[in-house]
């Protein structure tokens, strides 16, 4: 594949991101919506002095440990002050860069899998990347400055996976070290990165490496050692919110949390394939100690149904890889492990996870539809462009809710009132 063609694909992704999200440059700081303490804090205004950097990396802030994300805010303030447009531009550039990394990752993964031509693999990878670029579930992450830790974490996460893929291909030590380095950088942005070593094992399985071989096991030891250290730091950072949040979540019985798990999986799949009625807040259906609404018992069927589907598709590596990639990224947010969360689901948790489902969608779209439209390629191009345009326009409108705190407050009020009505019913 000529580098010129790859460059054109990258430019198309940049244009798609900019076309959807250009309004964010006019959005103000959401001071009543976390930006006041996440972005406009003392760590930001203290500048880039050595003492300030040491303080950022050595302290927890509001029960969080994301020093690299804070350093990112500090650097922008140091050079541009509290200019909201610059902060939003930087966020959008992270989103663009992440989208391009997704394109590179899927293309490299399929080339190593070696089931199609390089041209076909590039087309499939572009499909995954363009959905990542313009999908509505990304609107919150790109448009809300306080969600920047998801952007940075996702970029370094994907960079780590890509380095690992190239390491497998060439077994160059520098690439392995690069994967470890980006893994650490991702953790310095958000704790959900601890699932990455399991994703590496999934890649090994997909590429038919021997999971019992000595080299594969040795390769993972540094990653899992880092995970143990990361978990120690994460649990220490949660001490500030333990009494307020974690204990409340623990008070939900395991049986109810299993139902929440089925509900969350169902919601995340639905929001990936049919992203309607997206909200900032998805509250729990009831308070701790209250009776679970009867309708939620149906979600007990989701987990066994998903296990059955995976078993039946065990010979289809694309389906297994996409599904497990999706579930691995969401594993910390499915309520089996109680963590400090105020909502039962959140769109931002799909930012990395959705890549797994996009992978399956793009791959089978090509295999079932595109490859059989030899004589109707022109018509298919028009239809596909229109569909992507509709998705992009919808995402554009979804991002608009972040231009005003008033619209968000009104939305949350409506959500809570609706929950109250359902519970009364």
Image: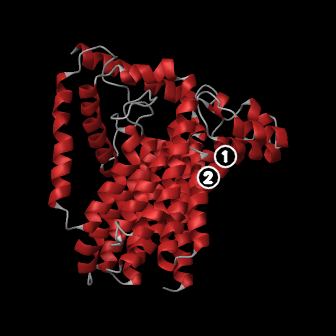
| Residue 15 visible in the displayed image | no
Residue 177 is left or right of residue 1, and the answer is: right
Q: Residue at (65%, 31%) from the top-left corner?
A: 60
* Residue bearing the label numbered 1: 68
Quadrant position of residue 238? top right
Q: Residues within 10 Å of mark 2 (few under 14, many from 20)?
A: many
Q: Residues within 10 Å of mark 1 (few under 14, many from 20)?
A: many
Quadrant position of residue 179? bottom right
Query: Residue 175, image x and y in percent?
Result: 58, 70
Residue 132 is left or right of residue 277, and the answer is: right
* Residue bearing the label numbered 2: 185
Q: Earlier in the sequence, mark 2 or mark 1?
A: 1
Residues under numbered marks 2 and 1 in contact, where contact means CB atoms less than 8 Å apart: yes
Query: Residue 31, image x and y in percent?
Result: 64, 28
| Above or below, 138 relative to 122 | above
Query: Residue 394, image x and y in percent?
Result: 42, 48
Extreme residue in the front direction? 214
| Residue 292 visible in the displayed image | yes
Residue 381 is left or right of residue 195, and the answer is: left
Q: State which quarter of the image contains the C terminus.
A: top left
């Amino acid at each position: 594949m000529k580098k010129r063609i790859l460059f054109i694909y990258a430019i198309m992704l940049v244009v798609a991101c900019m076309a959807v999200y250009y309004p964010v440059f006019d959005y103000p700081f959401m001071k009543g919506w976390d930006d006041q303490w996440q972005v406009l804090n003392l760590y930001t205004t203290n500048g880039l002095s050595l003492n300030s950097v040491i303080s950022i990396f050595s302290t927890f802030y509001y029960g969080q440990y994301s020093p690299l994300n804070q350093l990112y805010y500090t650097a922008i303030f140091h050079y541009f002050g509290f200019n909201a447009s610059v902060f939003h531009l930087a966020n959008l550039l992270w989103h663009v860069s992440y989208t391009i990394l997704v394109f590179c990752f899927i293309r490299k993964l399929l080339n190593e899998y070696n089931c199609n031509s390089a041209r076909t693999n590039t087309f499939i990878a572009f499909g995954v990347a363009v959905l990542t670029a313009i999908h509505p579930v990304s609107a919150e992450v790109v448009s809300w400055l306080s969600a920047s830790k998801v952007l940075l974490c996702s970029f370094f996460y994907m960079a780590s996976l890509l380095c690992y893929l190239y390491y497998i291909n060439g077994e160059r030590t520098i690439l392995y070290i690069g994967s470890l380095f980006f893994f650490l950088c991702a953790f310095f942005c958000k704790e959900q990165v601890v699932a990455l070593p399991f994703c590496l094992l999934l890649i090994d399985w997909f590429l038919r490496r021997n999971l019992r071989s000595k080299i594969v096991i040795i390769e993972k030891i540094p990653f899992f050692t880092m995970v143990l250290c990361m978990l120690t730091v994460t649990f220490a950072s949660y001490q500030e919110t333990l009494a307020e949040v974690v204990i409340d979540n623990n008070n939900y019985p395991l049986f109810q949390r299993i139902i929440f798990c089925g509900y969350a999986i169902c919601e995340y799949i639905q929001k990936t394939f049919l992203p309607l009625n997206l909200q900032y807040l998805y509250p729990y259906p009831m308070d701790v100690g209250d009776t679970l609404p009867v309708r939620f018992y149906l979600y007990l069927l989701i987990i066994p149904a998903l296990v059955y589907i995976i078993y039946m598709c065990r010979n289809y590596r694309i389906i297994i890889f996409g599904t497990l990639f999706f579930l691995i990224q969401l594993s910390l947010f499915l309520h089996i492990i109680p963590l400090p969360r105020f909502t039962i689901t959140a769109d931002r948790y799909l930012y990395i996870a959705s890549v797994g489902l996009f992978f399956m969608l793009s791959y089978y779209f090509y295999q079932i539809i595109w490859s059989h439209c030899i004589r109707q390629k022109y018509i298919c191009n028009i239809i596909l462009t229109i569909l992507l345009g509709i998705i992009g326009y919808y995402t554009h409108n979804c991002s608009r809710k972040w231009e005003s705190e008033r619209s968000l407050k009104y939305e949350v009020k409506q959500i809570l009132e609706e929950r109250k009505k359902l519970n009364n019913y």
